[in-house]
Image (cartoon, rainbow, N blue to C red):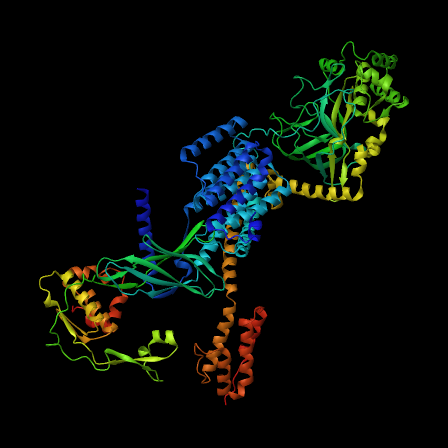
């Protein structure tokens, strides 16, 4: 807007310029909020701005005070009605935008505009509470710079300074503030929990796994490219077919739908009966928000750090157990063992629960399973027979299976024989239960894609998987993946290996596009990991790398604060010195004058009258040369150097040094 | 109430500054130890907002919120330095204040000089509730700020203590320095209303005749090298580009004797006012003036300089202690005054002590 007006060479009054800048800043800073605002709010803002310009340029009437008051109360109530609260980022920002609109309408002088500029900073801050991408951050950096320009211009009592001056000054102010920001950012103690309750965001999408599973209802599995989580392994990652990311388990089956246990065994795991074997694998998981409170870890997690509320449930699932959905990304570290045995004793009740099947469901499957148990085989043998059956029949792995009717498991096993992981997991679990083995379905993800640029794995929603876990008397819970029997490449190569024919996936595979996507994903992940995810955990890691081990939280905060204070003070001192040094350095051309003055004093000792104020250096040189003819050439040389150091536009320290050296070497032989 | 506290705090701080800084010479360069800085009210509100941001960041564990918070905190700090640097090294010089008649505004001129290579912005001069500026001073430049004070009484008026301050950039901070310079402006008595004719029959008893050739304007002739520059008719030069010399001959009119005793019916101030009026009238009529005050005699003379001597004598006439109490030299902290008076030829105008 400013640029367009400038091009038309409109001479704006100072007041209009101030208004224009304020308006631009206010609109610019409220822009990131627009998607979450009710439609009338931006309209109100733009109308208020338009009206204010009407007042300024065309002498429109200012709305009288009662009208403005009524507007303010009305807008306040409207926001309250819209969001039902004033707490929280969205309602707060909405209120802020509405307030800004009304304040702008009634802004009269510099002071009002300064207040608006200040609120603009706060709007930026509010947009950073909900939007965390690097692009938004870059936009905010630009806004901070522009807003600071506006602050300097509008804060002035007189005409605007040149934009070149203020733009450079604003940039310099922010650049000099940067080290301070960095130190405080790293060392200011972060809290593990909120100070006051944060209402959940209404717009956070739940794109993750469902907590129920109904094979046969879905006939076209959507290929969501959305990232579920990213994993960074400390050392060598496990083999691809060990990458089972364990999530919630489904126990209850009503003949069509699997669901989690209602009550009963949900809760924290107490007895540690898992035996871990072989090599451990440590990794960091950066989990995207999915509106759930469960976490994913490589089967089988042994140790974990991160959120304080991180627990392992009785079904070996990691989760945060403070209830309610997780509004933001979660960053946690886990150590897992891919080789383990979960020898967990089951009570009789539990055995029944894990083997329960609804009475009328899947008669054909039951009949099939009953043929396997005639010779009283071991659990392992039953599993082997079930897998052999799946392998021997013409089962097909497909993402577009036909819909299934009243007995989905039977229809799948004996008629259609087409399906994806859910179908297979469900069928196998039913078969095993029918054969008398306690079994359940585990949901999670399988595989992951290596981002070679970032050096981490990306696990997408399309990697979602379901498998069966069966309980054997001697071995405890054992993972059995039916898909491994039918489509081993799904497990070995990951999801893309199977869906190669899919058009959407093929489009993704265009090499450069994929590469670019990897680069961006790597940037975003580093951003998330190091900037957004910087919190108590990384602070502890930082302190440990500085040699402060094993501190309790209060001690850690104290140490951090101490470090923050000392470094800040040191920085402030350094900055003060630097700024005054800069000021002195800028008067370096006067250093040349000082040098020359000492030269003049030196010549004075040789009976050359001091330079009069009106006497230029050249005239002085000629006079001195006349007085000291045997040194004339050197005097002229010094003056020439002086002129260069003092007046040449590109003169630098070297010119000054040359002058100083020449003067130091200057001697007049006694005549 | 609040304002009262603020004002007495400020007064206390100013007195403290005066004690530690001492009196200033006519020209000073602002050094670090005499520049004070505090946040403005806007600065306080701004930092409150930054603190609110900090709380919000803590609550939402928002890393980017922390980043913006700390960036703005850093910004405030850097702005503080820029504000301080904006004054540091500036030179303050009292240029002067032309004498005025009581009732007119005494205008004090203070020059702010900038020797540094960078411009200084928005420098203001403050004396009590009076403000001059703000003014931007380019690198190497000097800007003159003028503060006008209303005057009521004859005698000296002075800026006993004024502030040079700046809020640049961003108005978050106010850096200032207190300056205690010998800044004085002479206030002549208010001229009485015209009407009373000039006294006649002058000359009797007045010592000396006006010096011929020195007092009365006679005409112009072209200037030659060696002529005194005071006599050059600069206005004529500006008009025609010719250097002309003003020639003076002996006075055309009789000099007036303006004596204190001529106005016995008036009070002290009215008498002085009337004498001022007469001085002005006589000067306008081109007549010489001789002034006779109790204890003080000014021989007849002519011309603006002589008029100024007469007016100064009237301005500083001391008929008792009340006039002395009004003069600023009676106040504390004006040490340079006495010295100057000794050297000045106008010392004659001072009442005997």
Vertical side of B243 occupied by A396: above or below: above
Left or right: B183 as drawn, with respect to A478: left
Residue placed furthest toward the bottom: A671
Q: Quadrant of residue B236?
A: bottom left
Looking at the picture, how far across and down is residue B30, in whole percent?
40, 61
In the image, B328 versus B187, the foreground residue is B187
Looking at the picture, how far across and down is residue A276, in whole percent?
74, 30
Count of picture labels: 0
Residue ID at (34%, 73%): B235
Residue placed furthest toward the left: B264
Residue ID at (43%, 39%): A62
In the image, A309 versus B84, the foreground residue is B84
Looking at the picture, how far across and down is residue B303, in whole percent?
24, 74
Does residue A597 show up?
yes
In the image, A56 versus A373, the foreground residue is A56
Left or right: A557 as drawn, with respect to B31: right
Q: Quadrant of residue A492?
A: top right
Left or right: B283 as drawn, with respect to B7: left
Does residue A492 show up?
no
Residue ID at (47%, 54%): B81
Looking at the picture, how far across and down is residue A191, in whole percent?
55, 36
């Amino acid at each position: 807007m400013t640029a367009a007006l400038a091009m038309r060479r409109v001479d704006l009054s100072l007041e209009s310029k101030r208004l224009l800048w304020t308006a631009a800043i206010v609109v610019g800073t409220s822009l990131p909020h627009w998607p979450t605002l009710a439609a009338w709010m931006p309209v109100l803002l733009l109308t208020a701005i338009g009206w204010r310009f009407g007042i300024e340029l065309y002498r429109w009437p200012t709305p009288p005070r009662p009208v403005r008051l009524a507007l303010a109360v009305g807008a306040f109530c409207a926001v309250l009605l819209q969001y039902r609260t004033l707490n929280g980022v969205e309602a707060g920002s909405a209120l802020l935008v509405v307030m800004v609109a009304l304040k702008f309408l009634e802004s009269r002088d510099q002071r009002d505009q300064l207040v608006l500029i200040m609120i603009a900073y706060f709007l930026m801050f509010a947009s950073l509470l909900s939007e965390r991408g690097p692009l938004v951050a870059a936009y905010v950096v630009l806004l901070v710079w522009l807003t600071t320009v506006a602050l300097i211009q509008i804060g002035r009592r007189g005409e605007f300074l040149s934009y070149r001056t203020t733009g450079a000054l604003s940039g310099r102010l922010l650049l000099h503030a940067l080290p301070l920001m960095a130190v405080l950012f790293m060392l200011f103690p972060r809290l593990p929990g909120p100070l006051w309750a944060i209402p959940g965001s209404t717009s956070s999408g739940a794109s993750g796994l469902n907590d129920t599973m109904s094979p046969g209802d879905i006939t076209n599995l959507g290929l969501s490219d959305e990232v579920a989580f990213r994993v960074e392994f400390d050392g060598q990652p496990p083999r691809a077919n060990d990458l089972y990311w364990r999530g919630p388990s489904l126990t209850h089956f009503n003949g069509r739908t699997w669901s989690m246990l209602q009550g009963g065994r949900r809760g924290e795991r107490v007895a540690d009966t898992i035996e871990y074997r072989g090599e451990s694998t440590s990794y960091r998981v950066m989990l995207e928000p999915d509106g759930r409170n469960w976490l994913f870890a490589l089967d089988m997690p042994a140790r974990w750090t991160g959120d304080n509320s991180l627990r392992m449930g009785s079904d070996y699932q990691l989760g945060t157990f403070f209830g309610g959905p997780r509004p933001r990304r979660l960053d946690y570290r886990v150590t897992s063992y891919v080789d383990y045995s979960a020898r967990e004793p089951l009570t009789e009740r539990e055995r029944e629960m894990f083997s329960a099947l609804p009475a009328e469901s899947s008669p054909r499957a039951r009949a099939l399973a009953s043929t396997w148990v005639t010779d009283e085989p071991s659990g392992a043998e039953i599993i082997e027979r079930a897998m052999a059956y799946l392998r021997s029949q013409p089962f097909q792995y497909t993402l577009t299976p036909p819909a299934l009717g009243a007995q989905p498991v039977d229809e799948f096993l004996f008629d259609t024989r087409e399906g994806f992981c859910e179908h297979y997991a469900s069928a196998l679990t039913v078969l095993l239960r029918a054969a008398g083995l306690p079994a359940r379905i585990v949901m999670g993800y399988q595989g992951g894609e290596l981002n070679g640029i970032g050096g981490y794995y990306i696990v997408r929603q399309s990697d979602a998987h379901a498998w069966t876990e069966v309980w054997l008397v001697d071995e405890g819970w054992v993972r059995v993946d039916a898909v491994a029997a039918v489509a081993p490449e799904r497990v070995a190569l990951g999801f893309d290996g199977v869906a190669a024919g899919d058009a959407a996936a093929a489009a993704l595979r265009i090499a450069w596009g994929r590469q670019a996507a990897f680069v961006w994903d790597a940037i975003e992940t580093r951003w998330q990991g190091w900037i957004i995810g910087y919190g108590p955990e990384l602070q502890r890691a930082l302190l440990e790398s500085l040699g402060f081990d094993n501190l309790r939280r209060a001690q850690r905060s104290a140490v951090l604060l101490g470090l923050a204070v000392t470094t800040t003070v040191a920085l402030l001192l350094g900055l003060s010195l630097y700024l005054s040094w800069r000021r002195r350095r800028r008067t370096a051309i006067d250093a040349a004058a000082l040098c020359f003055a000492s030269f003049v004093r030196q010549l004075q000792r040789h009976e050359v009258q001091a330079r009069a104020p009106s006497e230029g250096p050249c005239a002085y040189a000629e006079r001195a040369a006349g007085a000291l003819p045997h040194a004339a050439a050197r005097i002229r040389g010094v003056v020439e150097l002086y002129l260069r150091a003092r007046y040449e536009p590109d003169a630098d320290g070297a010119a000054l040094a040359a002058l100083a050296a020449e003067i130091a070497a200057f001697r007049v032989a006694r005549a | 109430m609040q304002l009262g506290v603020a004002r007495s705090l400020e007064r206390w701080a100013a007195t403290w500054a005066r004690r530690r800084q001492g009196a200033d010479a006519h020209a000073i360069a602002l050094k670090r130890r005499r520049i004070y800085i505090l946040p403005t009210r806007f600065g306080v509100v701004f930092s409150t907002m930054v603190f609110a941001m900090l709380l919000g960041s803590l609550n939402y564990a928002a890393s980017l919120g922390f980043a913006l918070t700390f960036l703005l905190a850093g910004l405030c700090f850097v702005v503080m330095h820029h504000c301080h640097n904006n004054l540091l090294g500036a030179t303050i010089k009292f240029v002067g204040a032309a004498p005025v008649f009581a009732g007119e505004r005494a205008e004090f001129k203070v020059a702010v000089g900038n020797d540094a290579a960078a411009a200084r912005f928005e420098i203001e001069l403050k004396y009590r509730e009076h403000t001059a500026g703000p003014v931007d001073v380019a690198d190497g430049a000097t800007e003159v700020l003028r503060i006008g004070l209303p005057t009521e009484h004859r005698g000296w008026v002075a800026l006993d203590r004024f502030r040079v301050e700046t809020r640049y950039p961003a108005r978050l901070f106010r850096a200032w320095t207190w300056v205690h310079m010998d800044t004085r402006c002479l206030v002549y008595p208010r001229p009485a209303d015209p009407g009373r004719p000039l006294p006649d029959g002058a000359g009797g008893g007045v010592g000396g005749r006006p010096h011929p050739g020195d007092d009365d304007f006679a005409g112009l002739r072209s200037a030659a090298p060696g002529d005194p520059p005071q006599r050059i008719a600069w206005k004529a030069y500006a008009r025609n580009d010719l250097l002309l010399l003003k020639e003076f001959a002996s006075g055309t009119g009789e000099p007036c004797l303006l004596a204190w005793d001529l106005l016995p019916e008036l009070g002290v101030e009215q008498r002085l006012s009337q004498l001022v009026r007469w001085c002005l009238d006589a000067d306008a009529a081109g007549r010489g003036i001789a002034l006779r005050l109790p204890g003080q005699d000014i021989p007849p003379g002519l011309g603006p300089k002589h008029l100024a001597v007469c007016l100064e004598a009237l301005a500083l006439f001391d008929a008792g202690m009340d006039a002395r109490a009004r003069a600023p030299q009676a106040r504390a902290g004006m040490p340079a005054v006495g010295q100057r008076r000794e050297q000045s030829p106008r010392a004659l105008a001072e009442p005997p002590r």
